[in-house]
Image (tube, helix red, strand yellow):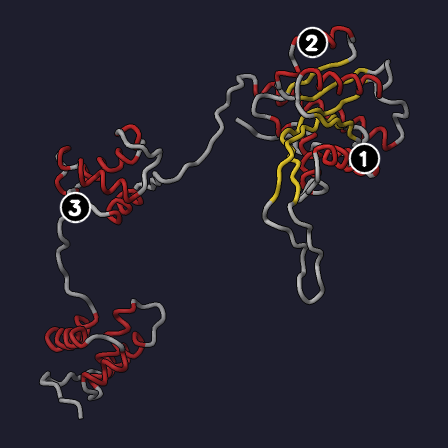
Amino acid sequence: MSRRTKLAKLFLEPEQREKLKAISRSRSAPLREVQRATILLLYTDGNPITRIQQLTKVSRPTIYKCIEKALAAGVETGLKDYYHRPFDPVIDDAAKAWVVNLACTKPKEHDLAAELWTYKELARYTREHAPAAGHFCLANAAKATIWRILSENDIRPHKVKYYLEKRDPEFEQKMQEVLMVYQEVNLQNDQAMSGVEKMPPKVITVSIDEKPGVQAIGTVAPDLPPKPEKYNSMGRDYEYKRFGTLSILGALDLHNGKMIAQVHDRHRSREFIELLKELDSTYPQESTIRIILDNHSAHVSKETMKYLASRPNRFVYVHTPKHGSWLNLIESAFSKMARTFLRHIRVSSREELKDRILKGIAEMNAAPVLFRWKKFDLGIV
């Protein structure tokens, strides 16, 4: 049998009882008030402290404190916390500013090996050097303390957010030139589809780029086919062998979606000139070949310029700005390759990889897709 408490009985007015009931059933009131209202109701009904503890899952000291406050100063006081003056912060603003300033530097600036801070290393360095800087309150700073200080200022010294610095002062102008070419090509293609323009365009626009580093990777064990009710996917050994890499030079015709491509071991001026020669032999001699391309050194080398001079008025360059290769439409064709026949490809030699790349491009040309630039208002500042 539970021992009866020595506390006095608590008497409630009908209005007080109804208010406590409403609070005890509330889903929006603070949890502490809900618990205390329930405690006072149970105590008023004559339940012993042990029973109240079992029903509310609250510690006995908390129950006693709630009842004693209600008996001493009323039910409203029993529901609320005592007012107390908060302690003055141990870590002052100057010490916090010192931690923030430290986090905005790199560890290597303080003769450490790491490139970025971790909270643990930052806390250790703070404990060792803050007292010498006059911030004795940081002498025992823990990792959690450093985390709270930096979180207040939204600083994450352990993370890197990459950005791209504009290194081309003519980025806007070059971008607008490329977009104007795409608008002209779209107009030519629309006229050709409507039957207005039946002759081939006098200016043929192609998009040129390279896809280097295509790896020739081979398996060391046979692939295992899927088996019903056992394996639902292709099985492949984790180990592999490397045979080297190849580079794809591609020229995408923006009028019919077909690609002229070559596969080489390297990408130099001589390989690029071979692609230009193939373009020259493919298109009518009376047409001008307008090329959208990036700023690779092979595109403007002495050897390339010498060849272009031997074919005056045949080729016209339109350069994409530096770090603006995404403006080149052939990147969409390369992306399609990576998602189709190059995906998970395994070969036994570089020669096989070359043959399969050319075969894959031939399959794409059999059902060409006309890549069009649709967003002309980029809003870049």
Identity, as a three-letter code, of the amino acid under mark 2: Met
Which tag is nearer the camera, tag 3 or tag 1?
Answer: 1
Residue 123: image x %, image y %?
A: 24, 42
Q: Secondary structure at mark 2?
A: helix
Please state which amino acid type lies under the numbered disc 1.
Ala
| Quadrant (top left/top right/bottom left/bottom right) for the N terminus | bottom left
Q: Is residue 102 left or right of residue 231?
A: left
Q: Position of residue 106 (x, y in %)?
A: 32, 31
Distance CA(mark 3)–CA(mark 2): 68 Å
Q: Could you classify mark 3 by the number of other residues whose Cα lies within 10 Å: few (under 14), some (14-19), or many (20 or more)? A: some
Q: Quadrant of residue 170?
A: top right
Q: Secondary structure at mark 1?
A: helix
Q: What amino acid does circle 3 point to?
A: Asn
Q: Earlier in the sequence, mark 3 or mark 2?
A: 3
In this view, 148 is above or below 128: below
Q: Where is mark 1, residue-wise?
A: 362
| 291 with respect to 135 (left or right) | right
Q: Which residue is mark 2?
A: 305
Calculate the distance from the C-alpha at mark 1 to the C-alpha at mark 2. Answer: 30 Å
Residue ID for mark 3: 140
Of 156 and 71, nearer the camera is 156
Front residue (pair 250, 188): 250
Residue depicted at x 71% and y 62%: 227
Q: Is residue 210 above or below residue 361?
A: above
The image quadrant of residue 256 is top right
Residue at 30% from the left image edge and 74% from the top image edge: 23
The span from disc 3 to disc 1 (Cα, nearest Å) is: 69 Å
Number of on-image labels: 3
Q: Residue at x 88, y 27 (%)?
A: 196
Badge 3 vs badge 1, beta-carbon distance below 8 Å: no
Q: Which mark is residue 298?
A: none
